[in-house]
Amino acid sequence: MKLKDITEKDIWNIADSSAIVARGLDYFETGQIASREVKG
């Protein structure tokens, strides 16, 4: 799977907790995401 093909459902499936997803969405919605780095 390519990074550009990841869906929100995929993120929910691999996240350790809903708090992690919520925090990431908050970062995105408030414009705090400046760049991305793929690991693993």
Image (cartoon, grey):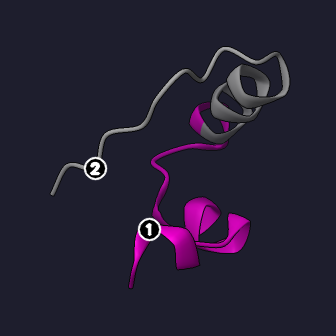
Q: Earlier in the sequence, mark 1 or mark 2?
A: 1
40 left or right of 35?
left
Residue at image x 65%, y 41%?
21
11 left or right of 7?
left
Measured in 3D between alpha carbons, the distance from the residue under mark 1 to the one under mark 2, in whole angstroms, is 8 Å
Whether residue 11 appears in magenta in the rendering, the answer is yes
Residue lying farthest to the front in this orientation: 35
Question: In the rendering, at what x and y percent does residue 19 appear?
Answer: 65, 31
Range drawn in magenta: 1-20
Residue on which disc 2 sits: 38
Residue 3's disc is: 1
Question: In the rendering, at what x and y percent does residue 38 appear?
Answer: 28, 49
34 left or right of 39?
right
Q: Secondary structure at mark 2?
A: loop
Residue at image x 66%, y 43%?
18
Looking at the rendered structure, the kind of residue marked 1 is Leu
Residue 30's disc is: none
Residue closer to the observer: 1 or 20: 1
Q: Is residue 36 above or below residue 38?
A: above
Question: In the rendering, at what x and y percent does residue 10 appear?
Answer: 58, 72
